[in-house]
Image: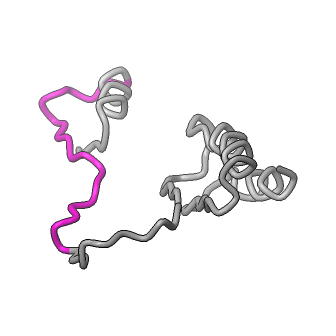
Amino acid sequence: MVTNSSAAAQRLIEEGVPDWKLAHVANGLGLDGFATDGERSRRRVITTVANLRPGKGHEILLKAAARVIRRVPDAQFRIVGDGPRRQMLGRQAATL
């Protein structure tokens, strides 16, 4: 089984999966394949990609995003994913 975090691995171990059956592959994106001309945009975009389910903390991110946007109006936040909390999170984002 492949996990993307030590927390996920620990959870599987607690559920009875032997640790020798687990491999860890960290989330991330190598930037070497993206050429730049040396100048970076000032655009501020914060993105999270996840399953929209309880325990992920997206509601905390939305509250933080509202605070950040009040101080940095050009900041953008994007939540990419789907799951049982999608509609609730959409309502919360619209309210905030």
| Residue shown at the point (61%, 62%) measured from the top left | 76
**In the drawing, does residue 72 fall left or right of residue 49?**
right
Front position in the image: 15 or 11: 11
**Residue 20, magenta (yes or no):** yes
**Residue 31's image quarter?**
bottom left
Where is residue 44 drawn, in percent x and y? 52, 61
**Residue 79's image quarter?**
bottom right
Residue 94, above or below 2: below
Residue 43, above or below 18: below
Residue 16, above or below 75: above
| Residue shown at the point (87%, 52%) measured from the top left | 95
Where is residue 23 drawn, in percent x and y? 17, 41
Where is residue 58 drawn, in percent x and y? 63, 44
The overriding secondary structure of the stretch rendered in magenta is: loop
**In the drawing, does residue 47 fall left or right of residue 76?**
left
**Residue 82, magenta (yes or no):** no
Front position in the image: 22 or 71: 71
| Residue shown at the point (70%, 52%) measured from the top left | 69
Farthest-out residue, top? 14
Where is residue 21 drawn, in percent x and y? 16, 36
* Image quadrant in which the N terminus is located: top left
Numbered disc total: 0
Front position in the image: 3 or 38: 38
Q: What stretch of residues is rendered in magenta?
A: 15-33
| Residue shown at the point (80%, 50%) measured from the top left | 92
Coloring applied to the structure? one colour
Farthest-out residue, right? 95
Farthest-out residue, front? 39
**In the drawing, does residue 65 fall left or right of residue 37?**
right
